[in-house]
Image (tube, grey):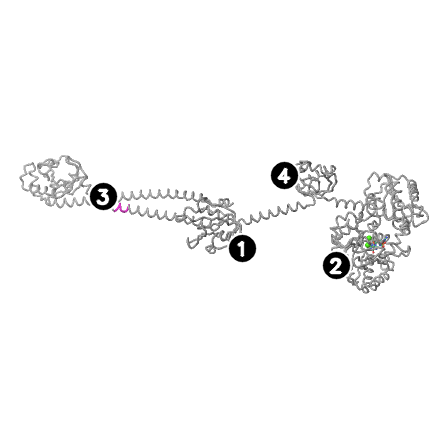
Amino acid sequence: MLEVAMNSNPSNPHTNENDNRNTGSRQGKSKGKKVASFVLLFLLLSMIFLGFSWSRHRQETRMEAIQLAESLGSIFHVEHISSISREADGANEQNTDYQLYKRNLMQLKETTQDIDFAYLLAERNGEVLILMDSEPEDSPKYSPPGQIYEEVDSTVKEPFETGETVITDPVADRWGNWVSVLVPVVDEATGETIALFGMDYDAWEWKEGILVKMIPDVVVLISILLLSGLFLRMRNQQNELKRLSKRLGYDEAMFRGVFNQAPIGIAIMEGPRFVTKRETGHSTVNPMFQSILGRSEKELENVEWRTITHPDDLPEDLDQYEKFRKGEIPGYSMEKRYVRPDGQSVWTYMVVSRLTDLPDSSNLHLCLLQDISARKEAEAVLEESERSKSLLLSNLPGMAYRCKYDWHWTMLFVSDGCYELTGYHPDDLVQNRRVAFNQLISPRYHRILWEEWNQAIEQERPFRSEYEIITAGGERKWVLEVGEGVLNARGEVEALEGIILDITERKQMEEQLRYQSEHDLWTTLYNRRSLERRLKEEDDESLRHKRALIAINVSPMQLLSMIYGFDYSQKALKSVANVLSSLCTKDRELYYTYEYRFVFYVKKVESREELEEFTQEIIKKVKGVLASDRINGGIGAVEIEARQKTDSSEFVDELFQQLLIVSEQAVQSNEKEWQVLFFNEQMTETIQREEVLIQEMEDVAKGNRTDRLYLLFQPLLDVKSGRISKFEALARFHSDAYGFISPVEFIPLAERTRLIIPLGWLILQKAFKFLCELNEKAEQSIAMNANISVIQLLKTDFIEEFIDLMQKMGVSAENITVELTESVFATNLADVNKVLEGLRSYGVQVAIDDFGTGYSSLSRERDLHVDCLKIDKSFIDRLLILDRKQTIVGDIISMGHKMGHQVVAEGVEYESQFDYLRESGCDLIQGYYIGKPMAKEEAEDLITDQWTEK
Ligand code: C2E
Ligand code: CA
Ligand code: CA
């Protein structure tokens, strides 16, 4: 990791160096050009200067030569020259002038070093003669006087004409190469040039002379050249120095930058200690190093690395360091902990290596640190999570798996729980070694599961399914599988993962509940709910025919219970059920819909006669069982015309209502004999009765003679304290026309007409009023349960009005419980919950009435916002006929408690029921065993007695 970090430093020194080199060579080239042009310029200037100097010195030399010649020329006198000239035929050597001048000339040549030849020339007849020269007569260069100067050129002749001194350019003649100065000797009288005095300089020497004179100039030039060279070199060196120091600056800045900002700690150490700033003048421990160790550079001056190394890591570090120190290894790296000043240790990855390239680096080494505590922590967390995962897996009530997405569900991993669940060891299942998981699945689920998985994968959602497996021992078990597809990087399913839990017990209870909710347990016949569903599900085929519901009302059998006891009556009931069952065919189904009420659902009815015949058959059968006890009953029939749909709840309710009315009347109208009534005949009367009742209830709702609606109060016993702690308010109606009416008849009527809303408020008002009166007398507060119809509950502003009424009447919310039948949750869950939440926020309690009869909502029980469950009477009844192992009342109580609810049992009539319920921890008990619904005076007495008794 460290290596990576170190190499991944993005600043690239190579590129910089290349740049430097490039700019360097570019600079070099331009410098070369500059130097070349400078040299060229210098050469040009030097040439100009030398040329100039040459011409100046030449001019000077010429002037000097002319001056010399002219001053010497002045020694010649015209007369003498004339005399010499006249005798210039060679005979004049005796001439004294000649001799004098000859001597002078010779002397001149001798004494004047530069002059090689001096002479006098004259012109005669267009020819130039040599009058004399400076040579002795034996000299090869000697010319006798008067000798014609043959090589003469036009320059020599010029002074004769102009009378001006002339200096020639180098001229060659028989004696050599010369520069001649020719001075005319002028006769003042005539102004004629009578002779020329000439001096010859050797051309080479002449040039040499000039060159010698130029030496200082050349010296100056060379000096300038040298100085410039020197200057250039110095400048160059200075530039190089500047460039180097700039580069050094960059290098220094880069080093400092890296040193100060590197994400790894860097320190220079000497043996056991840190090299200090005092010794080197600058930091040798970078900020990251300091931050990793939690110590400043200053603090590090006084510690040795071993004293801040974690004791557990020290031995290995010392061991490695010793080898390193002896030179056995070039360096080492390790993961180690340092201890910070606060005692915390920090995990690091450390690299130690020798510091080379330093003059005295024998004992110095470089220490690089990387903080790896985060990684170490992650490793620890991972380890912990692995540990807890394995703990979880080993305690899972089932198995966790990873399998291939194939038809066999080929297992790749199976947790240990597999054995307990399936009876196979994990090894048996993995890779289908002994058995493929698919073989464990009950065959009827093979295709279903495959398709469900496919769907889950396709829709990218978790898979969840319940199915049956067959264990190694042949046992069937219900399991719940929850899983998910594991996708690889390309989004393809790599495997499936999930858990499989044993839910056999829950399934059994559910099955039992379902069975119970659809059946009457004692008679084992389907119940009213099943019939309801059956009617709603009816298909087109059966709609083509007339159908009928035939109710057999044997309610007088209740007498048997009173005379001979519950057991006896129940056995008789079972016999009735058995004989009726014998009449069932494909088109005649039997249901037990209500206490002591059976219903035949008859399909494909041809005629009324057919039905009448059938009812006689029924009567014959039932009589066979009941005649000895002299118990009679009645039969009510409701016909459903062909094509009449029965898929609406309202119509089904209406059918049941009709059936109830017609069968009640069949019993009531003649208690001596069995009677058969068909609904049609009774319809008018029933409708009439309903109309009258509705009329009377409307009247009450308007506030007229409200005493017709009154309440009875049924006590609820608190099992723990053994006292009556509350009453349930139960409505009664006393009709002017029909006398006493059961709530079973008038409440549905009031609901149908929505009169239940005003009547409901009237009932609440009466209940609250009585509650206040009670609590004035009671020593401990008494509470009240009130039944509320969902029609009233869902009316807007229900909560506000309820709370208003409560406050107006002066009752406190804690003493009020609202009872709602379980069935209302099935349809309006969300709306109902909202109202219940509202009520509960004020402290009003909520109870589910008739709990257990609406199977569908049991599984959603968690979703209901209630405080209390009232177990339906039908469950309590069964306590008498089932033994304790068969009943689920105890389970319901403990489940209710688990969910934090209070549990009430209703319809408790016998001591044995009471005992069972008390032992099962039921909180409250209601029923005739405790007390029947009673008038308020009676209820008041009950409470006062309760307190005087104590
Ligand atoms: P519920 O709320 O389940 O009331 C319990 C019913 O069982 C009452 O019948 C009560 O008299 C009866 N009962 C109580 N203990 C026993 C017992 O030990 N054995 C037997 N066999 N029966 C017992 P009731 O008074 O005829 O009421 C019938 C239903 O009418 C009530 O059932 C309730 O759903 C409805 N109801 C009664 N009063 C009101 C009311 O004020 N408002 C509304 N909306 N419905 C009401
Ligand atoms: Ca109730
Ligand atoms: Ca109830």
Q: Amino acid at mark 2?
A: Gly
Position of residue 235 measured from the top left corner of the image (x, y, whole percent): 34, 48
Report the front residue among 206 and 741: 741
Q: Position of residue 518 (x, y in %)?
A: 81, 45
The mark found on residue 843 in the picture is 2
Instruction: Tell which quarter ligand 1 is in.
Output: bottom right
Residue visible at 17% across and 45% down in the picture = 64
Tag 1 near tag 3, CB within 8 Å: no
Q: Is residue 484 visible?
A: no
Residue 492, which numbered label?
4
- Residues at marks 3 and 4 touching, judged by CB atoms closer than 8 Å: no
Say which amino acid is labelled 1. Gly
Which mark, by number, is residue 457?
A: none
Crowding around mark 3 (Cα neighbors within 10 Å: few <14, some 14 to 19, many 20+) is: few
Any magenta on residue 595?
no
Front in this rendered view, residue 117 or 79 = 117
Q: Nearer the viewer, mark 3 or mark 4?
A: 4
- In the picture of the structure, the residue carrying the numbered disc 1 is 343
Q: Which residue is mark 3?
A: 55
